[in-house]
Amino acid sequence: MDHIVIDRITKSFGAFRALDDVSIRIAKGAIHAILGENGAGKTTLMNILYGLYKPDEGQILLNGRPLRMSSPADAISHGIGMIHQHFMLVNSLTVTENVVLGLEGGLRGVDFAAHEKRIRELAKSVGFDIEPAAEVWTLPMGMRQRVEILKALYRKADVLILDEPTSVLAPSEIGSFLESLKTLRAKNHTILFITHKLEEVMHVADRVTVMRHGRVTDEVDAAETTPRELAQRMVGRDVIMNLKRVKSAPGEVILKAEKLVATDDRGVRALDALSFELRAGEVFGITGVDGNGQRELSEVIAGLRPLDSGQIMASGHDIGPLDVKRRKDEAGIGFVPEDRQHTGLVLDYPVATNFILRDYDRQPASRHGLLDFKYMARNAADLVKRYDVRLRSPQQPVRFLSGGNQQKVILAREIEAKPKILVIMQACKGLDVGAIEFVQNTIFELKASGVGVLYISTELEHVLDIADRIGVMYRGRITGTLLPHEATSERLGELMAGVASEVV
Amino acid sequence: MVRVVQFLFVTKTIWAVVLALLVGSILMLSAGANPLYAYASLFGGAFFDYYGFGATLVKFSPILLAGLAVAIPLRGGLFNVGAEGQIYMGALFCAVAALYLPEFYWPLHLLVCALAGALGGAFWAAIAGYLKAYRGINEVIVTLLLNYVGINIVSYAAGGPMMEEGAPYPYSPEIPSSLFLPHIMLPTDAHAGALVGVLLAVILAFVLKYTTFGFALTTVGSNPQAAKYAGIHVQRQMVVTMALGGALAGLGGAFEILGVKYRLFHMFSPGYGFDGIVVAFMAGANPILVPIAALFFSGLRSGAQFMQRASGVDSTVIDAIQGLVVIFVAASLAIRFGESRWGKLLAQRRALDDQLTPVEKKNA
């Protein structure tokens, strides 16, 4: 019997359709995975299930009855518990205190001993090895996640929604976490598991719904599918050759990465002996499921993240000892970071100031340690015009520009620095069609002028549109490099899922 | 409407001070005095009486420099609550330079003493800056605790190795009279430190806005990640920012020795460094506004005796009113435009802009 039916749900934010006619049937006592790239609408859907958002159209049926929810409290009272990506725990309190926190009880005293006993029994019954008297800060991340689950179970939740649950876990914790999901399933709990990691889905899920651009593209039994097929569904379409692509004759190798090894912010290895070559006048696209080391790769090249081992050669010189500034000025590496609001721009600074962010301490932006505001104004007026940045005034803080215009500010700055190598990460994320076209044409112009472009993106269609070669990243390695005409969704799917690349 | 709200928002600190004074008048009423008369004697004494204003300026110098010592790191994303300790270390370094260096050409010697004070404060603050930047230790805690270390080091020095023989109280011998800071309002104690402080406030405002050094400092404060991307050495900048703040407080300490006390006393500061925190926040961390906030605060302190004499209100009421100012200013800083309300207004304008721009382009 279906425990939850999501029936033709549509949800828009302004002009953006986050969910478009989504229907999913979730069986009682099953682990149901919702798989999709970032921005596919998974989280929006879960927030609707949890009562945080109201759908524009459609309804949710719980045990066959329509569900009306206006807040998370309603969701909990219907037995729906959500485990967020970021834990909602008070680290200085004990497990018991955290679980009890927020339970209704008015002004009556709380009988912690009784609660603790019940929590201990509950933990035991679902196979969690947790000491209720332990303070949360002493527990590893995997245990804290179980405390979150206990919180939901203690409130009699029989539906658990887990939003990207493994993204905060160390690799060694993931296995036992997935096992605990199976234990919960055995207790007849229904589990909704949002993820973009294929191997986890294959490991635990009974049924899989694949989403893309706010639509359900497929719903299958996990037993009847393969990672390859799922990746293909996530990617979505067959390759359509883009006619805009400018042909160019790639020159010599200007960027050579050899056996790069680096760790991410949590200290987990993100790049695992990754190697590639980029030629002048070439666009090398790098794609893959999000979180396979793309961000770390871009930061390592730009000099924002240290290399653990390996070597990066730009125009034949090892750039390892150079800092961010010298990589830009001496090696000619331009960088458009993934996170434009937190890395690429200082949001509270005027647009004109952001244009000189990476050149502030040399001529013509400044002279003898004094900023040249006249030059900045002239420069801004010029760039705003040439790059068609829509704004009221160049003195306006860049915070108030739309995403597309913010991206143009960064692109203008990086391109005007006349780079030999340009690393662009997620260039088109969140941009509208017009802005995307602008970015693509800009990249074609750069390529024609002999710049080597490393285009890193999870948005496969954009990579296919502009790249001359496409490398696919999986777990910090490039699992295969394809020419655009070879890049069928089947091949890409294989490589993105980490299937060995010997077969053609 | 938006403009009115914006005006009220920008001037919120002033409203907070007014509210604090209003609540303070309740205290005065309960003490049986006429608040209007009490405030008139307070501010009249502090600002419109020659001797009173001189006394205000004496307090103005350290409070202003302490305010700058908090404001500058604040712009660099660091919270320096250690100005008090930095004042003490500045005074110690200055006193050592004044007492133990052989006397030489006095303007130079005076300069060396002042710089020694700045160095002492800078050193003290740089400890916290270094621990924050390279070891990730919270600078609030480190500067706070270093206050007590600094105060006690001075107590030890003034009561031990540097103590004047036969002194009834821990203090050092007097510094050579050639090193006394020039007075600016004889016969009051007001000294040139107040003028130097105002000059420094103006210079710092210029530095923050127009120099690459200031740009690096405020960029680290606004967005350290983007600062790194811009090629700024974020960690080094944090240490330098803290040291600059500490240097200002240290200079304030040096001026206390050179301009007012002429000796190193133990416990010589009545908490100027902590007043500096409030002053910096009242000024919104803007160096050019710090002198105004500092003048108000020092006036409050020096006008208290006038008020006590004129209206019989105990001067401890002023302590309470100072506390009220702190509370109200702190509360006013917590007022932000809610993301939703402000965000909605902005989203509307942005949507309007996106609509307008193409049309304007066509017209142009």
Image: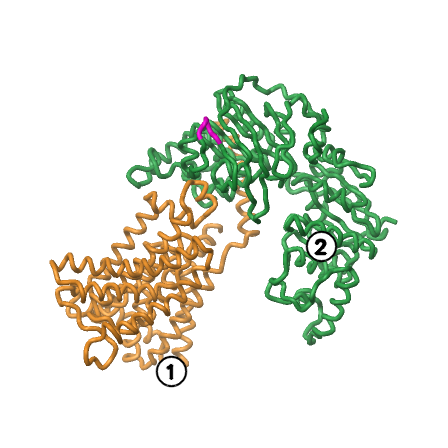
Residue type indicated by callout 1:
Gly
**Is the C-beta separation of discs 1 and 2 under 8 Å?**
no
Q: Is residue A432 left or right of residue A218?
A: left
Give the numbered dot on residue A82: 2
Q: Is residue B44 visible?
A: yes
Q: Quadrant of residue A459?
A: top right
Q: Is residue B41 visible?
A: no
- Chain shaded orange: B
Q: Which residue is mark 1?
A: B32
Q: Is residue A319 left or right of residue A489?
A: left
Q: Is residue B268 magenta?
A: no
**Residue B200 x %, y %:** 27, 54
How many marks the image carries: the answer is 2
What chain does mark 2 sit on?
Answer: A
From this view, report whether residue A75 is shown above or below residue A443.
Answer: below
Q: Is residue A369 left or right of residue A57?
A: left
Q: Main secondary structure of the magenta part?
A: strand
The residue carrying pointer 2 sits among few (fewer than 14), some (14 to 19) or many (20 or more) residues within 10 Å by Cα, namely many
What chain does mark 1 sit on?
Answer: B
Q: Secondary structure at mark 2?
A: strand
**Residue A310 x %, y %:** 52, 36
| Residue at the (60%, 24%) spot, across then down | A469
Question: Which marked residue is nearer to the observer: mark 1 or mark 2?
Answer: 2
**Residue B98 x %, y %:** 19, 64
Residue type indicated by callout 2:
Met
- Chain shaded green: A
Tell me the colour scheme of the image.
by chain
- Identify the magenta region: A313-317
Q: Nearer the viewer, residue A83 or A252?
A: A252
**Residue B187 x %, y %:** 15, 70
